[in-house]
């Protein structure tokens, strides 16, 4: 299974649907000594309660232009959150199950 196969997958927590995987997020480079480019590490997934389509980066609260698009996508992405990879209990072609007590982080990037 590829990470891209997770896009659009249903996300469950404690047996209840909480949304859909919208994006695999926050790749953090992990460089060893002597490496110019690090090996990417998956940090988390973005979950949207209503849609599995891309938001073109407008889920980040720093995106404000063009105003009409920013307002539309801001409304459309309301309630979205990021879950750390460690909080995934099970992931397969059938969907993603979050562990009990998984923390829901803001989609805003620092």
Image (cartoon, rainbow, N blue to C red):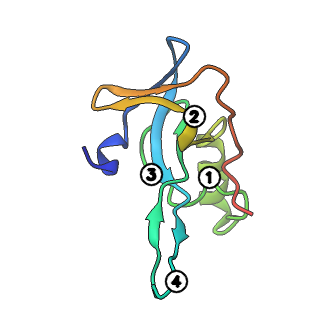
| Location of residue 110 with respect to 82 vertically, above or below | below
State the CA–CA distance, disc 2 to disc 3.
22 Å
Residue occupying image coordinates x 47% and y 76%: 38
State the CA–CA distance, disc 3 to disc 4.
36 Å
Q: Tell whether 103 sits left or right of 69.
A: right
* Circle 4 Cα neighbour tier, 10 Å, few/some/many (<14 / 14–19 / ≥20): few
Residue occupying image coordinates x 34% and y 49%: 3
Mark nearer the N terminus (4 vs 2): 4
Mark nearer the N terminus (3 vs 4): 4
Residue occupying image coordinates x 32% and y 31%: 92
Q: In what quadrant of the picture does the N terminus appear?
A: top left
Viewer-nearest of discs 4 and 2 = 4
Between 2 and 81, the one nearer to me in the picture: 2
Residue occupying image coordinates x 48% and y 55%: 42
Q: Which residue is mark 3?
A: 54
State the CA–CA distance, disc 2 to disc 1.
21 Å
Q: Which residue is mark 4?
A: 33
* Circle 3 Cα neighbour tier, 10 Å, few/some/many (<14 / 14–19 / ≥20): some
Disc ID at residue 59: 1
Q: Which residue is mark 2?
A: 87
Query: Answer yes or no: do the residues labelled 4 and 1 have beta carbons within 8 Å?
Result: no
Between 78 and 44, the one nearer to me in the picture: 44
Q: In what quadrant of the picture does the C terminus appear?
A: bottom right
Q: Quadrant of residue 64?
A: bottom right
Callout 1: SS: loop
Mark nearer the N terminus (3 vs 1): 3
Mark nearer the N terminus (2 vs 1): 1
Mark nearer the N terminus (4 vs 1): 4
């Amino acid at each position: 299974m590829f990470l891209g196969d997770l896009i659009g997958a249903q996300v469950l927590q404690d047996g209840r649907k909480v949304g859909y995987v919208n994006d695999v997020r926050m790749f953090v480079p992990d460089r060893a000594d002597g490496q110019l480019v690090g090996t990417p590490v998956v940090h988390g997934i973005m979950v949207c309660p209503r849609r599995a389509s891309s938001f073109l980066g407008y889920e980040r609260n720093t995106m404000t232009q063009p105003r009409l698009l920013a307002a539309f996508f801001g409304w459309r992405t309301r309630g979205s959150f990021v879950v750390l990879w460690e909080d995934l209990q099970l992931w397969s072609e059938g969907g993603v199950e979050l562990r009990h007590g998984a923390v829901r982080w803001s989609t805003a990037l620092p």
